[in-house]
Every structure is written in structure tokens, then in C-alpha cells.
Amino acid sequence: MARPFFGAPADCSRVQPSYMTEHVFQCLVRCVAGKKSHDFVFTRDDGSRIRDFRQAWWNACVRAGLGRFQCRGCESDVSEGRKCTTCNSNKKAKYIGLQFHDLRRTGIRNMSRKGVPEKVGMLISGHKTDSVYRRYNIVDMDVLKTATTKNRRAPTRDRPSREQP
């Protein structure tokens, strides 16, 4: 079941109706349990605000095998504390792997493959122009291969010959 909700975009120029799945709704219900209307939705266990979730995202991806930390100096993999023990570099190791923003591209590509009209996909993803939306909708090689195979199997029609005057 899809549940409607009304959210304002970051620029607060318009309120955009949208829908969420029951699973997402239940996750949000757990996030706001016991909080007041002016409290932040996503907080730490002690109730403090999460200002930047990138480090938590990176750590979760590393634990799931979807990313790694690499030393900026010697390029060896770094596991603990983002400090390199190989070259003792003072620089923090850089994260290489799945970025949170990659999920937006995946969502757009999945909507396109399931036949969701482009304008509806733009409303869901928050894109205002179709040119930016189409940049996210990357066609993969399997889709191209399938299209080529279908085109090769299509019956051909003989073209009518042009007679010379």
C-alpha cells in the first residue's frame, strides 16, 4: 500500500505531493517515536542531530563490502580510523565505493525500465528539467543488446522499386 505525504523541497518554492511504501512509512514512524514536532527525524541514539551522514554511510558500505578506504599517500587500503599504518600519512583516507547519490540514478533507471512516464519520474526524483533527468537514465549494454536482437528478428519489408522516367 502506498501512503501519500506532502513534502516541501529544499527551496520551499512549492509543496509536492508524493507517496511512500508501507515499509518506508513504518521506518519513519520508528524514527519519530517519542519526538516532538520540532525535533529532527534522524538523530543519534542520544537524540543529537545528525549533521552529515557521509561518514556513517561510508562505514556502513565498507562493512557491507560496497566500499573501502584508501590512503591518499601510498594508495594502500586502510581499515581502522582512516589513518594509514603503512606510510603513516597524516591525511585522512579517501572513500572509494557506493555513494548515496548513486541510489538516485538507480531509482531513475529502475522507473524508466518499468515504464514510468518521464514526467512522473521527474516529479518523484525532484528534477525540474527533462535534460537533467535524462542524464541520470543511463542505458546499459543489456538493454542495447536486447534492442539489437529484436531489431534483427523484425520482419523486413521489401521497398517498392523506383522506376526511372
Image (cartoon, rainbow, N blue to C red):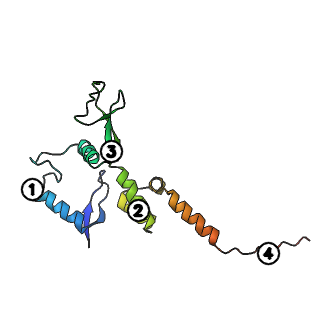
Q: What is the three-letter code of the residue carrying label 3?
A: Gly
Report which residue position mark 3 lands on.
67
Quarter of the figure that contains the N terminus: bottom left
Quarter of the image for residue 107 reads bottom left
Question: In the image, which disc is placed on residue 110?
Answer: 2
Q: Position of residue 7 (x, y in %)?
A: 26, 60
Name the element at disc 2: helix
Quarter of the image for residue 92 reads top left
Vertical placement of residue 155 versus 38, above or below:
below
Q: Are marks 3 and 4 in contact (CB under 8 Å)?
A: no
Question: In the image, which disc is placed on residue 138?
Answer: none
Quarter of the figure that contains the C terminus: bottom right
Count up the numbered dots.
4
Decide which of 31, 148 is in the foreground and name it. Answer: 148
N-terminal of the two: label 2 or label 4? 2
Residue at 44% x, 56% y: name it: 133
Report which residue position mark 4 lands on.
160
Q: CA distance from mark 2 to mark 3?
A: 22 Å
Q: CA distance from mark 1 to mark 2?
A: 36 Å
Name the element at disc 4: loop
Q: What is the three-letter code of the residue carrying label 1?
A: Lys
Q: Nearer the viewer, mark 1 or mark 4?
A: 4
- Give the crowd class for mark 2: few <14, some 14-19, many >=20 residues within 10 Å: some
Vertical placement of residue 90 versus 164, above or below:
above
